[in-house]
Structure formats: C-alpha cells, structure tokens
Image: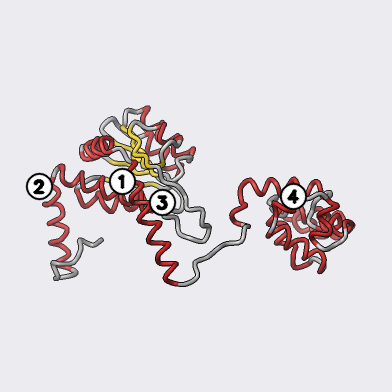
Amino acid sequence: MSHQTRRAAAPAVRSLLPPEARAGEDAARLPQDIFSQIIAREPQLSRSHKVIARVVLTHPREFVEKPIEALAPWVGVSAPTIVRFCRAVGCEGLKDLKLKVMGGLRVGLRYLEPLTPPRNTEEIVERVMRRAQHAMATALQTIDFALLEQAARLIRGARTLYVFGSGGVSSWLIAEVQNRLFRLGLHVTPSADHQMQMMLAATAKPSDVVLCCSLTGRNGELIKAAAIAAEYGASTIALTTAGSLLADAVQLPLAMALTDDRDVLGPTSMRYGFLIAIDMLSYMIALDNSRDVQETMRRIKQQFLTYRDEDDRQPLCD
C-alpha cells in the first residue's frame, strides 16, 4: 500500500474505532503539559467540570495538596465528579492528575498565579524605569573591569570577531554588537543559528575571537561552539550571567549577577545590563585606536552627508 493510500485510509479506519479509543487517540495528540490539555478541553467540559478546571488552573498548588475528602467540599462538587473530570482531561484518576499538575508546577507556577499589575500608567512607567536602572547598576557593580579591558584589547586586534547567540534577546544582542563594532573598522560575523555557529567555529583561527551572548548561560549548543573555536586556537569571550555554564566554558567571562524580574508580563530588564556592557566594551575598543576609528566613522558620515542626510548633527545612523 502506498503512503497516499495509507493516509487516505486512516480516517476511515479511525471512524471504526469505539468512542473511548478515539478519545484516547485524541488525548495522545494533545500536549503532555496537563495545563494545556485542560485549557484545550475546557470548552467541551460540563458545567461542573469547568468549575474543577478553573480551580486547577488558578489554584494548582492547593488542588494538589488537599486530600479527596477536603477537595470535594473546597471545590464545591462531589468526589465522583472530580474522578470523572480526571478521566475527561486524559488522566487515569485523581492521583494521576495530581502527579501531572505537580510536574507542571515545577516549571510554570508563576505563569498560573494571579498577577498584581500596576494600577495605572504612572506605575507602569515607574516599574519599567526602576527595573532598567537596577539592571544597569547591577551590571556596573558586578562585571570585572580588568576582564572587560582584556576583552576589548583582544577584540580590537582580532582578524575576525564571531558573535554567537540564540533566542529572543541574545539573537538581537549579537546584532547590536555588530552594529556597534563594524563602524569601528572591525570585521564582525554574527550568527544566531547553532549549526552555522558550529561551522564558523570550526573555521576559526588563532587570530580570531568568538564572543558568545547568553542571558541564561545554559545554552548547550553555544557552549559547544565556544569549545570548538577554542580547540582551533581562537580566543573565547562570553557576555552572560555570573556562575553560569557558559561563563565557565570560555577564557574571558564578562559575567554579571543579573537576575530575571519574575514578572511574566513585563519585559526582561536583564537586557539593559547586557546592552550597557556592550556599550562599555565598544567605547573601550574605540578609544584604544581612536585615530583609525575616527577615520572609519568619518567615511561613513561623509557618505551619509552626500547621499542621505545633510544635517551633520544627526547620530551616525544608530
């Protein structure tokens, strides 16, 4: 039987299955994340089952901790109704549901807990500003200035600077490094793709530098790329958090004691700490060879004045 014939026959075969088997097949296709399973099934649940679903989603820790005798009156439904709910969301029983909820709590409790949002626009602005200022102050207090100076010298003398990073913030941090340093006359090659990072690292030479950016410092593929580059003699630098695996894996860790705000709706203020570190690093590099840097930047500005914007007071295309 061809692949096309098997695919066409699959719906017909499925229609012959008893309802319980089809339900089991549907459950197998749902995410193993119990919270996602409950949310996906919630619209089809009965009224009493929806009550239980809301309790599990909004008070998961209390749901897990209470025995069945206390759970039923706390939720406001009967014990058999709770057991039926467990089966309705793909669990064998209450014990199985509690085990899956406990597994979900290990990684996602703060995404389920009720939030205490700012009361008004002024509080939003104040919270964002305060967190950004705190991240920058922490970066200044915890980064090693001697290592920062050493990193600036290495980068300034590099044949090629490879900048690696992946993820939501790290991927644009490497673009910011390129934006800051190409205008200083440096040859910068950024990459946010793990496979490409590995290949570029394998082509690195002793005159090259690899700078790895990671907020968590736990990116295993990034650590591998740094190890490959070091194997071929390139210098390795990390812009990351203190005490991380990446910080231990490179020759020069520019590590800062930055932590997450734990506000799931707020922007990650850690990135401000990384940005100020990049600015400090680029300014040191510029000052280290100011005559050549000024000439490179003059040439860039000259072309902008000629072809795009005659106002010399504008920033250099930041």
**Circle 3 Cα neighbour tier, 10 Å, few/some/many (<14 / 14–19 / ≥20):** many
Q: CA distance from mark 2 to mark 4?
A: 67 Å
Q: Is residue 22 visible?
A: no
Q: Which residue is mark 4?
A: 64
At numbered mark 4, what does the secondary structure look like: helix, strand or loop?
helix
Q: Which mark is residue 190?
A: none
Amino acid beneath label 3: Met
At numbered mark 1, what does the secondary structure look like: helix, strand or loop?
helix
Q: Which residue is mark 3?
A: 270
Residue at the image position 37 percent from the left and 32 percent from the top = 250
Question: Residue 222: x and y, percent?
Answer: 44, 39
In the picture provided, is 153 more to the left or to the right than 306?
Answer: right
Q: Which residue is mark 1?
A: 140
Quarter of the image with the C terminus is: bottom left
Residue at the image position 74 percent from the left and 56 percent from the top = 7
Q: Out of 295 and 53, give the one closest to the viewer.
A: 53
Q: Which mark is residue 291?
A: 2
Judged by depth in the image, the label closer to the viewer, 2 or 4, is 4
Residue 310 vs 28, above or below: the answer is below
